[in-house]
């Protein structure tokens, strides 16, 4: 198995309390991997560590075979590792189009020394990114709201904008933190179809989700966390049949 992402011995403490106590697993390249576990298992904290928002106290993160432990989020995005957030983020006064453009890579005009020399190359790059933003908006069925502020969108549309922003960064792998949370069933099915299509195009996905039906539908590989540690990995059927997993979710019988 070739791993797109491998975490080894990841620890993280908050005020002396261990949120992550030695997490270890690998995400196979080209897979949709589900990251599941009861509330408080450390899933979102782990995504924050992997994506560079938090630095681990110990352990190693490797992306596409290279050590990236503690790398800044923008440097990870430049390597092709991007993420979405459980609560959709954005700038209230900016439109959907502006949000997508903000995440376009290799923009000459964003560099201090190049900005005053806004030349033909920079204008061409801006035009390329604008076309990519429109293409992503059409793909995600957001073209009819592309000029609307994000505050005017539904919860599901905001989740789609989150996905769109990651696509603007030309990802090789996307970490998704509950992309269907709070979304109506129709749009949930639409988002699931988008994720399957992206994976079919070669993008590796790691998905945090509490809906087990969606995990069964989407994920060929599942990682279960509990109490800040990796509990078990395997196929969906293998992990749900595991007694440790059942105890973590349902409690131990006495």
Image (spheres, rainbow, N blue to C red):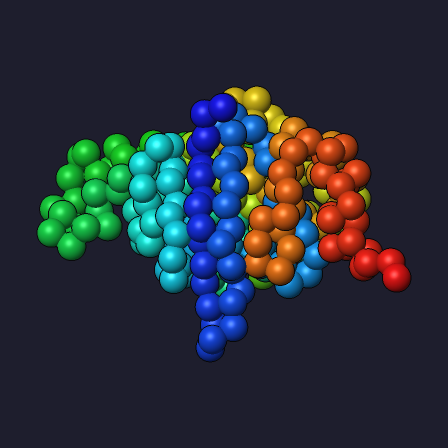
Q: Does residue 57 appear left or right of residue 22 in this picture?
A: left
Looking at the image, the residue that sits furthest to the front is 254
Residue 205 locus on image (x, y percent):
54, 36
Q: Is residue 89 visible?
A: no
Q: Is residue 150 above or below residue 60?
A: below
For the point 39% across and 45% down, the residue is: 61
Looking at the image, the residue that sits furthest to the right is 254
Residue 162 locus on image (x, y percent):
53, 48
Of residues 18 and 177, the one drawn nearer to the viewer in this rendering: 18
For the point 16% across and 44% down, the residue is: 118
Q: Is residue 233 above or below residue 245?
A: above
For the point 64% across and 55% down, the residue is: 226
Looking at the image, the residue that sits furthest to the bottom is 15
Q: Does residue 121 appear left or right of residue 54 in this picture?
A: left
Residue 88 locus on image (x, y percent):
57, 57
Q: Does residue 235 appear left or right of residue 69 in this picture?
A: right
Q: How many marks?
A: 0
Q: Quadrant of the C terminus?
A: bottom right
Q: Is residue 30 visible?
A: yes
Residue 34 locus on image (x, y percent):
63, 40
Of residues 217 and 106, the one drawn nearer to the viewer in this rendering: 217
For the point 48% across and 27% down, the residue is: 29
């Amino acid at each position: 198995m070739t791993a797109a992402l491998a975490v080894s011995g990841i620890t993280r403490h908050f005020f002396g309390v261990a949120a992550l106590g030695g997490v270890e697993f690998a995400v196979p390249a080209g897979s949709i991997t589900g990251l599941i576990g009861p509330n408080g298992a450390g899933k979102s904290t782990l995504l924050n560590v992997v994506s560079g928002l938090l630095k681990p106290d110990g352990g190693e993160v490797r992306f596409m075979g290279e050590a990236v432990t503690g790398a800044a989020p923008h440097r990870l995005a430049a390597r092709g590792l991007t993420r979405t957030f459980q609560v959709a983020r954005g700038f209230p006064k900016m439109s959907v189009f502006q949000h997508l453009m903000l995440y376009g890579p290799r923009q000459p005009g964003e560099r201090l020394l190049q900005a005053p020399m806004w030349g033909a190359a920079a204008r061409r790059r801006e035009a390329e990114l604008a076309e990519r933003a429109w293409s992503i908006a059409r793909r995600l069925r957001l073209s009819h709201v592309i000029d609307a502020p994000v505050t005017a969108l539904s919860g599901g549309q905001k989740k789609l904008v989150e996905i769109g922003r990651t696509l603007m960064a030309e990802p090789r792998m996307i970490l998704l933190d509950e992309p269907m949370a709070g979304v109506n069933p129709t749009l949930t099915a639409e988002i699931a179809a988008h994720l399957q299509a992206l994976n079919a195009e070669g993008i590796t996905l790691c998905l945090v989700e509490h809906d087990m039906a969606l995990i069964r539908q989407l994920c060929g590989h599942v990682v279960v966390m509990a109490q800040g540690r990796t509990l078990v990995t395997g196929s969906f059927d293998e992990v749900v049949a595991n007694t440790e997993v059942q105890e973590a979710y349902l409690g131990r019988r006495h």
